[in-house]
Amino acid sequence: MKKVILISAALSLLLVGCAEKSSSTKVAQDSACYFMDIDSAKTSCKNGQVAVFAPSRWGNEQLPIYAASSFCDFRFSIVQTNGGVSCVFTDARLKEKVADKKDDATPAK
C-alpha cells in the first residue's frame, strides 16, 4: 500500500511539471488590428491583440519575416505567408527599437 501511495505521489509530481504554464498575456479575441507598415504597428495595436500585417508593397518576401520578428509574441502561433503575417501582438521588441533609435540620435561626446 505504501508503494502505491509513493508511486502515485511521484507520478503526480512529474505530471505537474508537464502542465503548461499560463501566459501573463491575455489574447483579445474580440478585435484585431490591421496595419500596412511596421512603424504604424505601435500606434495601431495593443499587447495581446491579434495583429494582421499586410504590407502595401509586394515583392519583398522578407517583409513578413521582419514584421514577425518585430511585433509577434512567439509564445503563440504565428501565421506567415509571403504576403503578410497574423499573430498575437507584443510591443516588447518595438520598445527596444525606439530606445535604440534614441541612443543613435544622441550626439557623441
Image (tube, rainbow, N blue to C red):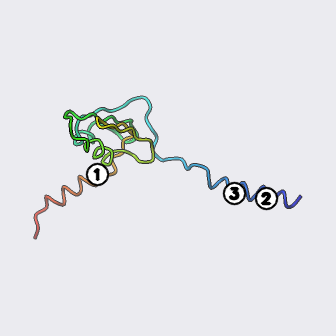
Asked if marks 3 and 1 touch (Cβ < 8 Å), the reply is no
Point out residue 69 in the picture as x, y percentages from the top left corner. Answer: 32, 48
Secondary structure at badge 3 equals helix
Asked if marks 2 and 1 touch (Cβ < 8 Å), the reply is no
20 up-or-down from 53: above or below? below
Asked if marks 3 and 2 touch (Cβ < 8 Å), the reply is no
**Distance of label 3 from label 1 (alpha carbons):** 39 Å
Of residues 105 and 34, which is closer to you in this image? 34
Residue 95 disc label: 1
Return the residue found at the far bottom: 109
Picture quadrant of residue 56:
top left
Viewed as shown, does residue 6 lie left or right of 26? right
Closer mark to the observer between disc 3 and disc 2: 2
Of residues 41 and 106, which is closer to you in this image? 41
Kind of residue at disc 3: Leu
Q: Label 2 crowding class (10 Å Cα cut-off): few <14, some 14-19, many 20+? A: few
Closer mark to the observer between disc 3 and disc 1: 3
Viewed as shown, does residue 37 lie left or right of 92? left
**Distance of label 3 from label 2 (alpha carbons):** 10 Å
Kind of residue at disc 1: Lys
Residue ID for mark 3: 13
- Residue under the point 28% across and 36% down: 44
- Residue under the point 25% across and 53% down: 97
Picture quadrant of residue 90:
top left
- Residue under the point 36% across and 31% down: 32
Q: Label 1 crowding class (10 Å Cα cut-off): few <14, some 14-19, many 20+? A: few
